[in-house]
Image (tube, helix red, strand yellow):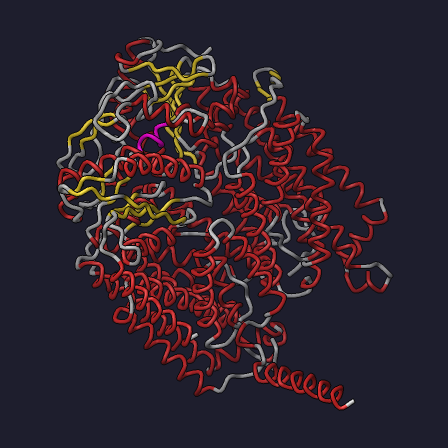
Amino acid sequence: MNANRFRFPARGAHLLFAGGVLLLAAMPFLADNYFVRLATFVCMYGALALSWNFIGGYAGYPSFSTAAFVGLGSYVGGLLQNAGVPMVLAWLGATVFVSLFAALLGGAILRMKGHYFAIGSITLVEVLRMVASLWVDVTGGGDGLNIRILDGGPDFAGRVFLYAMLAVMLCAWATTLAVERSRLGFGLRCISQNEEAADMVGIDTNRYKTAAYTLSAVYCGTVGAIYASWVSYIAPTDAFGILLTLKVPVMAMLGGLGTVYGPLVGATAFVLMEETIWARFLDYHQAILGVVIVLLIFFLPGGLLKIDYRRGLARIRSAAWARAGRATATEVR
Amino acid sequence: MTPKLIRTALLSALLMGATALAQAQSTIRIGAPLALTGGLADEGKKQQVAYDMWLKRVNAAGGINVGGTRRKVELITYDYQSDEKRAQQMAEKLITQDKVEFLTAPFGSGHTKVVAGVAERYGIPVMASAASSESVFDQGYKYLFGTLAPNGGLVDSMIRTFTAQMPTVKKIAILGREDVFPRSMAATMKAHAEKAGLKVVHNEYFPVGALDHSASLSRIKASGAEWIYITGYTKDLILVRKQMADLGTTAPIITMITGPAYREFIDALGPLANNVSSATWWHPSSQYKADDVFGSTKAFYDEFVAREKHDPDYVHASAAAALIALQKAIEKAGSTQGAKVRDALASLDAMTFYGPVKFGPNGMNAGRDLPIIQVQSGKVAVLYPQAVKQADLVAVR
Amino acid sequence: MSLYAQIVVNGLMLGALYACIAVGFSLVWGVLNVINMLHGSFIVLGGYLAYFAWLHWQVSPFVMLLAVSVGLFLLGFLLQYGLVNRVVSQPVLTTLTLTFGLDMILYNLMNVWFDATPRRISLDLGRLDLNGVIVPNDRLLAMLLALAMTGVLYLVLRSSRIGRAIVAVRMDRDAATLMGIRVGRVYAITFGIGALMAGACGVLMSVVFPITTNITGLLLGKAFVICVIGGLGTVPGALVGGLALGLIESVAGNFLGAQSAILVGSLLMLVLLMTRPTGLIGKRGYQ
């Protein structure tokens, strides 16, 4: 981890964030439902990226389990709602279930390291998808699960789900702030730098890692449950989508791993980028997204937040002066 | 990040205002989210061709007659990349920004349901041309209509025709893909076969993405089935048919849904496709005459072949028929208002080049005389209904 | 009794193809410590090239094997030398994301140039009937070729200079550098070999399965499972893993149904990852 990274002044960052949240919340009054939906996706991916940041950013374990938790949350939330539980309670129920699931599984999965952990975490997605597909009596199998559509028209529904996703994102943000300043955050950063040394210094690595893995699951579960109520239909292949589980770490990386605002910046930038690219380049949008990812790896290894803006600006300024200086010199000659 | 969002929001508000002013809504706008890239791209392109054929004819005649005024039609297409989240976004964009009054449904069953969910809230009618499973129409949505008849009808006519022409067939083996449509076709067959007195000696589902079916096919071979019935997407069926030939799994009747209905299936299998039977929702040899933009099945067929240089399949026909049904409903309602057109669709009972269109209470087209086909000597022959019958069922050798 | 024999034979034939799918992937992972997300797309690319050569110019796929191998080796070599080498020592996530991005580009290009219609080379080669056990000849041929290529690769790794350089780099990169081995070049050659094996596998598969871009993710997934089961970075590991997976899927498919077969494979992989990540015959792997 780059210890010399430039830290954006904390107060400025919080103000910007507050402004962003206000803008998202005001979207229904500023623009049409398409933008409301876009804003909802921004909140959703923001929450997912922040969640992933716990295990992938702070702890340094590259998890690809995001889709597993989101899908599980979708199914549990959907099943609860179908059983008569009121919508918001169903969301909470799904959150609790997914958190417990991650906590129980964490111990086993976190024994793997590096590449193996990555593979194990992605296998979880596959296994859950197949279970959802096989357990026809409960999940409907390949047919998918219907959830009752929310009454009240598109504007009302748009607002409900925007604010729901925004609330989850805010909770994830608050948790990240808390972790960043706590012993857990410190311990996780130690683990990500050198796990054995951290262990020797007295950090209970197993407990901390499991905590990080569980935290990475909590809000994914909520997001999944809200998504199921929003869309009113879920099926195994899309609920446990591999593309989602691969995109979310990229978003966090784009913004900056192990920071509070990095994942949010990355998620917003990614969603907006996808929208503009897709709108303009029909046939090759996926390739262009791939190119963007490749460029990101080469030129923005620490993410958008870790670019030293001040130094960059200073360099540009001095280059401009140097050029001006040379010009005057030749003129004089 | 923040200034960018504000700018985009303001710009969109401005654009909205501008479009609202500029628009007297003189054209009828239909939104078509299509999978033009990604896994379902082939099917998406089929729909696109059919829509385009209808669009050209309608506008050539001056447009749709809405209560006395002829209004031209505009089709707005977006590629949703075979991705579910994109499909919803596209639907929302088409409705709120492009101000479409009607939507067509995308190809996949799951994607259809998701788009219908968005449209239902706005009261925008959605025409689905590629969904035939009851589970797609089981959410109680009032604004979703589909031109494909429910799977049950196909299964019934198959059972009747085959058992009549080959009365010694008593045992059937079923193998289906665990995915909305193929699953439904398999489950429906199991239920109806048992009711018809056949013995189901094998009933299994294979997962999405299976690369090998030798285990299932070996067991089917051991079961002694006289009728082997497989459902899946084209690439699954190609693989299964080949492995059946490899393993020597065979029976007098081999049915693949909906293999032979697609040219790609016959092309890829060559001689192995011979004598494979199937049921379909429409066949070019049908002889419907109708008061629609094409006028008759033959007219549609001729124009399609001239344009695409190969035969159309039921997806093409159903897609064109979906828009014809919409057109007739608009004309009947005398308005393009969502609720009125929806009611007109619900009570529609019309004949088209594709066949009769009459939507049931769940929005699905009532099935009638759906063709049963078999590949004979490399070409598709119709076995039923009597009116267009070209050949008898031939046993697989 | 012949049913059991058939199950075993099916499993072995499938397993040989699986081994071929995985061996290139395993080598790249073991030697470079890079998870190559492009692997599935390389396989499909090889298959498509063979298909179109067969369709337009009637070139036999077994001849295409050579052309595709060379072509894909070059592609892999250039990709590694130009791009992946720059990030090869960075953490898992970086390299994986890079190859993921490259894969998106390749996948999109293939979809646009070749489109996703399933393609299959139909060679009617008949089948053998050994006492009730059926062996389709094209699968048998594909299996023998897969085994042959794997064997050649094994010999190359053991006996040739470049092969031993690759093994040296895998064992200890820094020591290898100190011994004068140009690690960057070795990496590029290894990646090239990985791409070559993938492409060759694609050619063999196009004879047996319908090829479409939709299956790239599926093939990649199989490669993962096989590497974990067999062990990383060695040819015998990929072979054992591939054959094991083929047999498991065949047996489970017969007794538990097709869907459960794949689930069993994945569960086995999870269990192995938790208990014995180096796989059945792997040595100390990368953490």
Q: Is residue C178 above or below residue A203?
A: above
Q: Is C34 positioned to the left or the right of B50 in the image?
A: right
Magenta range: B313-318
Q: Is residue A245 above or below residue C106?
A: below
- Quadrant of the rendered image containing residue B109: top left
Q: Residue at x 59, y 58 (%)?
A: C96
Asked whether B378 or C123 is in front, the reply is B378
Q: Is A321 positioned to the left or the right of B12 in the image?
A: right
Quadrant, the N terminus of chain A: bottom right
Q: Residue at x 28, y 62 (%)?
A: A33
Q: Residue at x 82, y 50 (%)?
A: C164
Q: Say whether residue B337 is magenta.
A: no
Q: Is B282 positioned to the left or the right of B345 in the image?
A: right
Q: Is residue B294 above or below residue A183?
A: above
Rendered location of residue C65, percent (x, y):
70, 33
- Quadrant of the rendered image containing residue A319: bottom right
Asked whether A228 or B357 is in front, the reply is B357
Rendered location of residue B112, percent (x, y):
31, 44
Q: Is A253 positioned to the left or the right of C43 in the image?
A: left
- Quadrant of the rendered image containing residue A48: bottom left
Residue A204 visible (yes or no): no
Quadrant, the C terminus of chain A: bottom right
The residue lying furthest to the bottom in this view is A332
Asked whether B122 or A79 is in front, the reply is B122
Asked whether B109 or B91 is in front, the reply is B91
Rendered location of residue A208, percent (x, y):
49, 72
